[in-house]
Image (cartoon, rainbow, N blue to C red):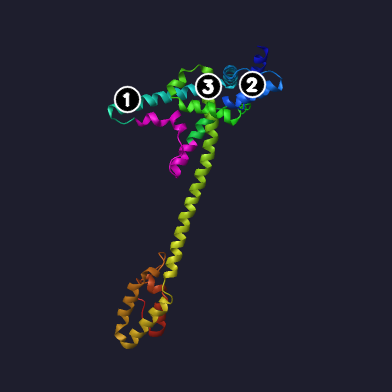
Amino acid sequence: MADAEEMTAWLISTQLASDQNIERLKELVIIRFREQQVEPPRNDRIERLIRSAYHTYEQTLFAETFQKLPQVTRERFDALLARSITVADTDTSEDEEGGETPLAVYAEIVLHDLKTNPGPVGLESVMKEIAKLRLLDHFALPIDLFSTLSPKVLSLYRQRAAAEPPRELRRHPEEVRSTLLAAFCWQRRQEIIDGLIDLLLLIVHKIGAKAEKHVTKELVEEIRRVEGKERILCEVAEAALMKRKNTRPKVMRIVNKCIPACVPPTATTIGGSSPFLLISPVSVFLTKRYDVPYN
């Protein structure tokens, strides 16, 4: 009996905060008995001993965690559960009636929202994740709340809270539900921060890829441009003018019609003449050599 009590105390003080796997704990208990030169009991008795130690440890953990939580945090946990139950009941009734859930019900984040992962990459998903993070920060969990628990054990309590519906969580004693919700919010906050960073990196990558595509398109269009286009147009205009002098206005109209895209949107006009004829090297060439007017 004394050996069993000593083993229970040893499990509670040294093992259960870092590992709660029954099979691994059995191996540790057998090794511990042998180190103390005590014959290990039967396998089923070792398992009962471990479960008894686990129950005692868990009740102590619930009580200590509850005492660490500020009163305002407990009240906000209860408000979250009440809001989540209301939304769940509204969803059920609306599904039965075939109607739509009022938008006002979704004005505040509920437990189900905290369980969901980020949506598609975009600003809307970023804003939703920020809203979740603000709610979790609003609970004001103490920094040292789970300082004695390993992340692996803490994850077990977080999973219990995530698996149970809000109504079932509220049926637990206050110490139990507050601890489960605290474990869930503690780890979920870290996950949301990591997910938000990844989401922002994806958005930056998406913006960079879009900008790169746009620049590539401009470069391709620039490469495809006909080299010496203005020189060719000057030669065409010169040949036409040398053949028939009375074709000068007609040539200018053709030039004006064919390459208006060369004119910047900010180009100005003088005396009603087209922006292209005002700045184009072709118009300058024709004006200097053949005295062709701008308009």
Residue type at numbered disc 2: Leu
N-term-proximal mark, 1 vs 3: 1
Q: Residues within 10 Å of mark 3 (few under 14, many from 20)?
A: many
User: Would you say residue 110 is visible in this rendering?
Assistant: no
Query: x%, y% of residue 269?
Result: 38, 69
How many tags in the picture? 3
Cβ atoms under marks 1 and 3 closer than 8 Å: no
Q: Check residue 112 for magenta coloring.
A: yes
Question: Could you tell me how far apart the alpha carbons at marks 1 and 2 are, in whole angstroms?
Answer: 48 Å
Q: Which mark is residue 93?
A: 1
Front residue of 31/17: it is 31
N-term-proximal mark, 3 vs 2: 2
Which image quarter is the N terminus in?
top right
Query: x%, y% of residue 287?
Result: 39, 81
Residue at x 62% of width, y 25% of height:
27
Name the residue tied to disc 3: 178
Q: Which residues are magenta?
A: 102-130
Secondary structure of residue under mark 1:
helix
Question: Could you tell me how far apart the alpha carbons at marks 1 and 3 are, in whole angstroms?
Answer: 28 Å
Q: Magenta span: helix, strand or loop, mainly?
A: helix
Name the residue tied to disc 2: 11
